[in-house]
Amino acid sequence: MKVPTIKDLTDKMVEVGLITSEQLKKAREQLQDSGLNLGEILISEGYITEDVFMAFMGKQSDLSYVDLKSYGDISDDVLKLVPENFARKRGLIPVKKTDGTLTVAISDPMNIFAIDDLKAITGKNIEIVLAVRNEIKKAIDRFYGTGFIDEFEEETSADDNNDSSVEVDIDAGDAFNSIIQELSKAKPGEAELQVMSDSDDDRMQDITKIKQASEEAPVVKMVNLIILNAIKKRASDIHIEPFDKSCRIRYRIDGVLHPQPAPPKNIYNAIVARLKVMALADLAEKRLPQDGRIKVKFGKREIDLRISFLPSTFGEKVVMRILDSSSLCLDLLQLGFEKRDLARFKKIINNPNGIVLVTGPTGSGKTTTLYSALTNLNRPDVNINTIEDPVEYILKGIIQVQAKPDIGLDFASGLETFLRQDPDVIMVGEIRNKETAEIAINAALTGHLVFSTLHTNDAPTAVTRLNNMGIEPFLISSTVIMSLAQRLVRTICEECKESYEVEPAVLENYGLTEKEIGDKKKVKLYKGRGCKKCSDTGYKGRIAIYELMEVTNEIRELINSRSPAYKIKQQAVLQGMNTLRLAALNKVLEGATTIDEMIRVTASDTG
């Protein structure tokens, strides 16, 4: 077989009149900057269709051309010879096999490395046929089972372009139920995976069985559906958990876990294995925790899944954090600040130096607040560096560094290096120890503005936390310029929102004063009745509440005298600080959230 070069092929096309010499000249002019080969440019410019191009290439190289659109079924025995990841990466698909030969459809017959790798993987002679690249991709989706994603996206992408929060109730639909039924057909024990023995040969055999089970079409569809359903429901996390005779799937939606329909236990290990394959994790390792990352495309949105595998009594628990950059709000006006606090926040973050601390538990929106602050400061004349673990979203114009503690690149070492990079603004993901705190303080003392996070329950306790790390009070008081605590509260669904009235005394119990209530006999509040849009919860979306403590001269004196956190809090309130409870109460009065949500998220100020 003699495969012509692209140059030979395009010259021949001019000879036979498929393209003009002028079209070829224009395509060659684009060659250097486009990153495509000559054939791809001709196709992208519309000078020739891809199927005509492929058919002509086949004729010139004595290769058969196949139309995969009308191709019949490809048997599982053939598909199993080539791993799905390899097929996708190399742009090929096996179509049939004979005794010692595997026939593979490929769009680029000059890719001899892919063909050599196939020989090594399959141990067979490789015969190639030509097919259109896009049709190969569709065939991979169709025959390997992941076509479910594309079908679902085609149905929803039009709505997605107009409303990123559009809801589609698919967890109780025909797709999910049909997959459950298909998976449940296996006889008891038939699909279960046996415990690995100490023999290396047996161990490898069992790993192979797990991998094969994970690539079965129903399992692939089930994993796709779990992820897609979570994205459509705006979940931030997916929990997949094993128990003795069952398993459980839960989505964290607006900060609360919601149970979902679960598959049969006998394919749980295959689901975990499928996720490990997707995340490039070690299939053989079941005794130690593992982390991985999956990147998926949903319509026009690219979504990162950070995945954690945790060995437990009845199998490995899987938690996936969904990071959707399209849902990231970087506008300070939309975060939930009250007007007075927003003005103070903007004033403080424009200081030339000092430390700004954002506190709160995991999942309270600290990263979004920090990213919003950095975006507000991001200008051509400002050098901003961040070190994060992980880098959750990419910020244009800002240098972001992924921490890698296993090779010595932790927050402390990254922060120390930043000081040699002529920065103006620095963000360190979290102050976890005395070393990181000391370097952050040194950076602030030498004229830099430093942003970081601490895990504390309120803003004043950040001072106590730094004291406990061994930082001297005078260093804290001279560098920390603001401590900001925050939480996320669920907002009432606008579709089913309804009003009701309460006695003023009810709100007095939560900290509202008689002066603020005035002479009202009743106070109007709101709640969600529950509807399809909010999955009958009465809530849809979240908004942040803030407790902003500006470090004034009076608070500096309290820090230097090692005063307890409650005294610092009292002084901050006297200076006008809204506590988290009062900030939540204001959102209740505005009709943004409910009393129940306020109680769930915030603690009483009276202890």
Image (tube, helix red, strand yellow):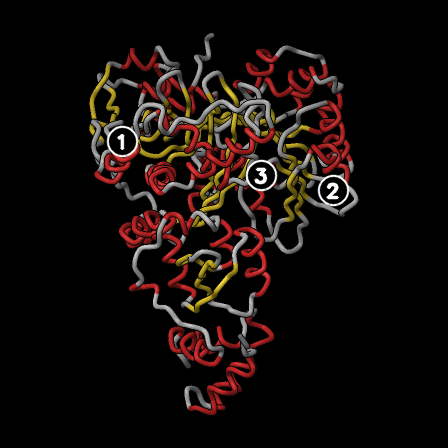
Whether label 1 touches label 2, CB < 8 Å: no
Pointer 1 residue: 185
Q: Which residue is drawn at the image coordinates 47% and 28% (left, top)?
A: 318
In this view, 386 is above or below 10: above
Task: Answer left or right for 505 relative to 327.
Answer: left
**How far across and down, in percent of the image, does residue 200 sit?**
60, 29
**Mark earlier in primary sequence (1, 3):** 1
Mark 3: secondary structure: helix
The secondary structure type at the circle numbered 1 is loop
Marks 3 and 1: in contact by CB < 8 Å?
no
In the image, which is nearer the foreground, mark 1 or mark 3?
1
Residue found farthest to the top: 607
Is 335 or 206 nearer to us in this picture?
206
Left or right relative to 73: residue 548:
right
| Residue type for callout 3 | Lys
Quadrant of the rendered structure where residue 99 is? Answer: bottom left
For the residue carrying disc 2, how many other residues have a C-alpha within 10 Å: few (<14), some (14-19), or many (20+)?
many
The answer to whether any part of residue 249 appears in the image is no
Task: Please tell me which residue is depicted at 52% across the width and 42% down the height of the picture.
Answer: 372
Identify residue for label 2. Answer: 418
Q: CA distance from mark 3 to mark 2?
A: 25 Å
Separation of disc 1 and disc 3 at Cα?
64 Å
Residue 596, placed above or below residue 56: above
- Location of residue 497 (image quadrant): top left
Disc nearest the viewer among 1 and 2: 1
Residue 581 seen in the figure: yes
Above or below for 515 versus 304: above
For marks 1 and 2, give the CA distance: 58 Å
Amino acid type of disc 2? Phe
Picture disc at residue 347: 3
